[in-house]
Amino acid sequence: MSGSAATAVPQREARLRSESSAVRRRRIGTALTYSVLLAIAVVYIFPFVIAVVTAFKTEPDATANPLSLVPSPATTTAFHQLYKDQDFLVWVKNSAIVTLSVTFLRVFLDSLAGYALARLRFRGRGAAFATIVAVMAVPGVVLLIPKFLMIRQLGMYDTYYGMIVPLLVDAAGVFIMKNFFESIPVSVEESARIDGASIFRIYWSIVLPMARPALVTIFILSFQGSWNELAQFIISAQSTSLNTLTKGVAQLASGQLGVGNRYPLKLAASVLMTIPVAILFFVFQRRIMNASAGAVKE
Amino acid sequence: MAAITFDSVTKTYGDGFRAVSDLDLDVADGEFVVLVGPSGCGKTTALRMLAGLEEISGGEIRIGERVVNNLPPRDRDVAMVFQNYALYPHMTVAENIGFALRMRKVPKPEARKRIEETARIIGLLDHLDRKPRQLSGGQRQRVAMGRAIVREPQVFLMDEPLSNLDAKLRVQMRAEISRIQRQLRVTTVYVTHDQVEAMTMGDRVAVLRRGVLQQFDAPQRLYERPANLFVASFIGSPAMNVLEAALERNGDGLAARVGSSVLPLADRRAELAGYAGRRIALGIRPEALGEDDARSNGNHGHLPGVVRAVEALGPEQLAHVEVEATPVLAEDVLEGLVDTEEARELAEIKSDGADARALVVARLDASTTVRPDERVDLAVDLRKLHFFDLDSGAAIGA
C-alpha cells in the first residue's frame, strides 16, 4: 500500500510537469499566431494611418518625413485650404446627390427585379436571369464607351441624370435579392394573397420588410460603390460644377506643375471622403439581423 | 357561411402526375369536414385548389352558389391557416390579425374592435403588441387562427395547423379549434394526416388515397363500416388486424377458417354468402380480440397464438400475438398503416417461416397477466368482424 503510494507521487509530478509544458507550448503557439496576425493587420492599416497623419502635417514636413507617424508640427492647414481654395463643398454636394439617388433607387429596383425573378411566373424568366448573371461577368470598363455613347445619344451628357441613371440597377444586387426572396417561405406570401393583398402590396408590405438583411447589404454596397465611383462620372460629365468627391480628389492627386506635391491637401480630402462610408458600416452592421424570425415554424 | 361543392375536380401537373382525380365532395353549410390520408394523397392539393392557390385542371369548385374556378384567392372569401402559421414576422399580433381588414379598407375603429374581439376569442388580448418571435408555438398558432377568424369569411381552410405543436398542446388546440368552429359555425375544411385529429374533430371525414376519394362519412361510420381495406387499415389505432380467411358453409350459416381455427359467423349478409368457398380478407379490430374467459360466450370464436410482446398503456394493454394465419399484405393494407414499424413487422413475420403466421394486436384489460412467450387463446367477437374482397379490397356488402 505504502509502496504504491510512493510510486504514485512521482507519477503525478511527471504528469503535472508534462501538462505544464503542454500549456506553455500552447501559449507560445498562440502568441506566435497573434504576432503574425498583428503584423499583417499593421501592413494593411499602415497606409490609412499614414494618410490620416499626413493630413495633419505641414507640406515641408510631409515631404521630408513622408512615413513619420507624428506630425511635427500638427496643423489643420490642409483642411482649411480644402474649404478655401477648392470646391470641396460642391464635390460633397454632388457626391451626396448622386450617391443617395443611386442607393435608394437601386435598392428599390434591384429588389423589385429580384422579386419578379424569384416569384412571378412569366415567359423568358430563366433567360432574363441568365442574362443578368452573364452581365456580372463583364468587366465594367468594357462598358464605359458604350455607356458614354448612349448617354450622349439620350441627351444626358453633363447632367445628374447621366451620372445617376447608368448606375441605377446592378446585376449583383438583383442576384442577391432574388436568392434572398427565394429563401422566404412561400406560405407567408400565399397567406397575404388570401388576405387580399395584391402582388405589389405583398412585395412592399410583407416581403420587403422580411428582406431587411439583404436590403442592408445592397444599401451598403450601393452607397460604397457610388460614393467611390470615378469612371462613370468621368464619362458622363465634364463641368467642374458636376465634379464629385472622387473626381475632385483625383484631379488633386494628378497635380499641377508648380504647386508642389500637396500631400497633406490630397490626403485630407481622402480622409474626409472615407468618413461617410465608415459611419455607414458602423451603423448598419448592428442592423443586419434575421428579419424573418417567427414567421413560420421551422 | 356557405356550402362547398367539389364536382369531378381533377388536378394534373405538367409532368402528367395526377394529384387529385375526379373528386366529388359536398360540404354542408357550417359543417366541419376533415380531409385525411397519407402523404401524397392529394388532400393539401384539394385544399389549395379550394383556396385558389392551385389551378384546377378539370371539374368545378363551388362556394355557395358561385363557381370559383377562376377567381383569385382574395375574391373567394376564404381564410386559411397554414401548417407553418405563415405569420408576418415584422408585424405585431394586432397587425397580423388586422392585415386582412386593412387590405379590405375596413375603417380603423371597426377594425380595432374586431381585432380585440378576435384576440379575446383566441385568448391573446394581452399579447396584441408582441411580435411573432416573442410568442410560443401555441400562441403563434392562435394568431394564425385569429387572422382567419377576424375576416369572418364564408369558409375556413386549415392545412395541418397542429402538426408543428407538441403532443400535449396539440390535444389542447384540437379542442380549441373545435370550440371556435362550433361557436362561429363557419364551414371548415381541415386537412390532416393524423387520423386521431380527423376522428375527433370532423363532423364528416373524407379519406383520400393517391388522389382518389375512398370514403366520405361520419367518423364513427368510417370506423365501424370502412368501405375498403385501405380505410379499414388507415382508420383506427392500433390498426385493424387483417387476415386471410376461407369462407365455408357451416350448417345453414357460414364460417371463416383462419389457419386451423374456425370462426362461425354471426353475420348473415346475402353478399357474404356469395363468397362461400372463396378466400376473403377478414378484418378484426384489436378491441374485438380478448382473453378467453368466462365472459366469452356464443358470440365468440377462438384464435390460439403465442404472445410476442405486451405494451402496458395504463388503462389497457396491447398484446402482440402471433397466430396461425396468413396476413393480408395487400398494398391497400400496408399503405393504410400509419405506423411503418407495424407494416415492417407484418412483412417480417410473413417471410419468417414456411407456416403462415401473422401478428395480431389485441386490446386487453389492464388486469390481464399475459406475458411474452405465453400461449394464449384469443376470444374473437364474432359480431365485430369485417369482410373484404381479397382482390378488390372493397368491403363485402358495404
Image: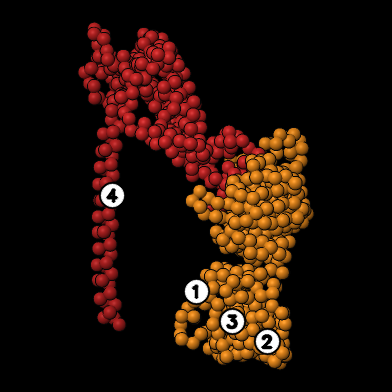
**Residue at (48%, 43%) from the top-left corner?**
A182
Look at mark 3 in the image and give the residue it sits on: B279
Look at mark 4 in the image and give the residue it sits on: A30
**Relative height, residue A272 to residue B278 (above, below):** above
> Mark 1 belongs to which amino acid?
Arg
Look at mark 1 in the image and give the residue it sits on: B344
Chain ID, red in image: A
Secondary structure state at the residue bearing disc 1: helix
> Mark 2 belongs to which amino acid?
Leu
Q: Foreground: B279 or B77?
A: B279
Callout 1 crowding tier (Cα within 10 Å): few <14, some 14–19, many ≥20? few
The quadrant where residue B378 appears: bottom right
Q: Residue furthest top?
A: A258
C-alpha span from label 1 to label 3: 24 Å
> Mark 3 belongs to which amino acid?
Arg
Return the chain for callout 3.
Answer: B
Judged by depth in the image, the label closer to the viewer, 4 or 3, is: 3
Look at mark 2 in the image and give the residue it sits on: B254
**Can marks 4 and 1 be said to lie on one chain?**
no
Callout 2 crowding tier (Cα within 10 Å): few <14, some 14–19, many ≥20? many
Chain ID, orange in image: B
**Residue at (59%, 55%) from the top-left corner?**
B20
Return the chain for callout 2.
Answer: B
* Left/right of residue B146 with respect to residue A40 in the rendered view: right
> Mark 4 belongs to which amino acid?
Thr
Secondary structure state at the residue bearing disc 3: strand
**Relative height, residue B104 to residue B228 (above, below):** above
Secondary structure state at the residue bearing disc 4: helix
